[in-house]
Image: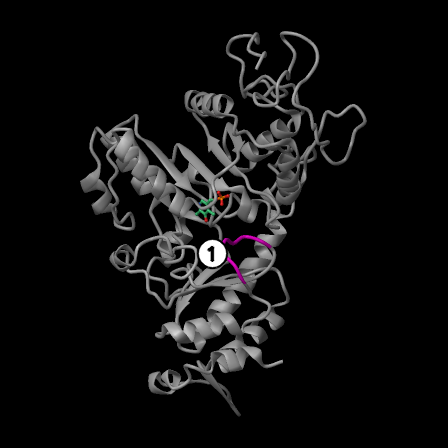
Amino acid sequence: MSTPNAPSGIGKAIRHLDLDYHDLPPSPAPSSPSNGRKYALATELVYTEGSDQYNASSVPIYQSATFKGGPGQEYDYTRSGNPTRTHLERHMAKIMNANRALVVVTGDDLYGGTNRLLTYLRENGGIIVKHVDTTRLENVKATLSEKTTMVLLETPTNPLIKIVDIAGISTAAHEANPECVVAVDNTMMSPYLQNPLDLGADVTYESGTKYLSGHHDVMAGVIGINSVALGDKFYFMINSTGCGLAPFDSWLLLRGVKTLAVRMEKQQANAMAIAQFLEGHGFKVRYPGLKSHSQYALHQSQARGAGAVLSFETGSIPLSERIVECTKLFGISVSFGCVNSLISMPCRMSHASIDPATRKERALPEDIIRLCVGIEDLGDLVDDLSQALVRAGAVRLTSNGFQALSAEETAGESGRTRQVVDEP
Ligand SMILES: *Cc1c(COP(=O)(O)O)cnc(C)c1O
């Protein structure tokens, strides 16, 4: 990028220039002009201002690889910087409480992808990777040393919905090695519900494919950082490998994120009701919004909501399979965070690549069903689940509502699956 002939000491102090010296108006606005109070996140999500010559209400897609002019101009080559992407990055930085956000293209499945990458780095990059149960602070502390260069966390985890103490681990990691980078995958929560940088993490990253975009029509990732030096390192990688997000994808993500607040509010309200519905029928439900969750208090202390992903166990793999096949509104699909409700069996789908021994080691139940709740009408969603539970043979409809079937009764239901599914 042909920009850094900017004065020294420049940065967030000068409001109209971002860290890359792009002269854009603040986006979104930092505070209400009438009372000086900081705008709430729901307002900031929607509010964007562009510097487009025609005052376009929607940020234009600068579908251009190059920009004419010469040295010293804001943009020259889209790999290094593009106005649509910059606008998105500034918007995201604000929302993530970061000084800088970078948007990149991501791989297909981080869970498997991260493991693959870590295995590769272990074998080829001379990096020692230690997997520990990060829900126990003592475990993490026992593993940390001055040689620990990064701690990689995810909370809540998926699909076991385990909660990790971001602040506690960040403090411990920085005590062990002040240079240690604590990175948090915030995909399950989104910046609307959780801000790892405010809890002491150095890097927060998340899949833009999920809640941020909300419609499963774009693949992207966002990295939020406060340290200028760390931001420069990430930018170097993005510029040299060319994985910066394309203008059209930047535009899609920018459009999607405006409705993050309304989508998330509706999705988690639906999720809470469904979690209570399932728990009420005797299923073992994992959802951080339920008081029965063993780490309910920890989650509440670091997040503003429980999100919209939950999982439950039925006690029988064939029964779980039948329930998944019998839902209609819940689409059978990997991924989550879109406006439509989804259902899956992680051991058969998203986590199938993890070998069964490892799944067992991580106590991932083979019958676990994951629900990613969307914005549909709650009554219709509960109805859909109810009929699936009845048709799959998990519950029986009685005059007082539903009644759970015993293990022997449900075992007798297997083999009926296709017949049930084929019913009109
Ligand atoms: C989906 C997912 C990712 C990967 O994101 P993609 O956009 O699919 O590359 C990373 N972390 C978590 C927790 C995810 O669920």
17 or 337: nearer the viewer: 337
**What kind of colouring is applied to the model shown?**
one colour
Q: Can residue 127 be seen here?
A: yes
Up/down of 405 relative to 96, above or below = below
Q: Residue at x 45, y 28 (%)?
A: 226
Quarter of the image where the N terminus is located: top right
Q: Which residues are magenta?
A: 332-338
Up/down of 403 relative to 278, above or below = below
Helix, strand or loop: magenta stretch: loop
For label 1, the residue is 306
Q: Determine the image quadrant of residue 246.
A: top right
Q: Is residue 84 magenta?
A: no
List x then y, in percent, for residue 48: 68, 34
List x then y, in percent, for residue 239: 51, 22
Quarter of the image where the C terminus is located: bottom right
List x then y, in percent, for residue 401: 52, 86
Q: Secondary structure at mark 1?
A: loop
Q: Which residue is the extreme one toward the right?
A: 54
Say left or right for 104 vs 115.
right
Q: Is residue 335 magenta?
A: yes
Say left or right for 396 vs 83.
left
415 or 144: nearer the viewer: 415
Up/down of 214 relative to 198, above or below = below
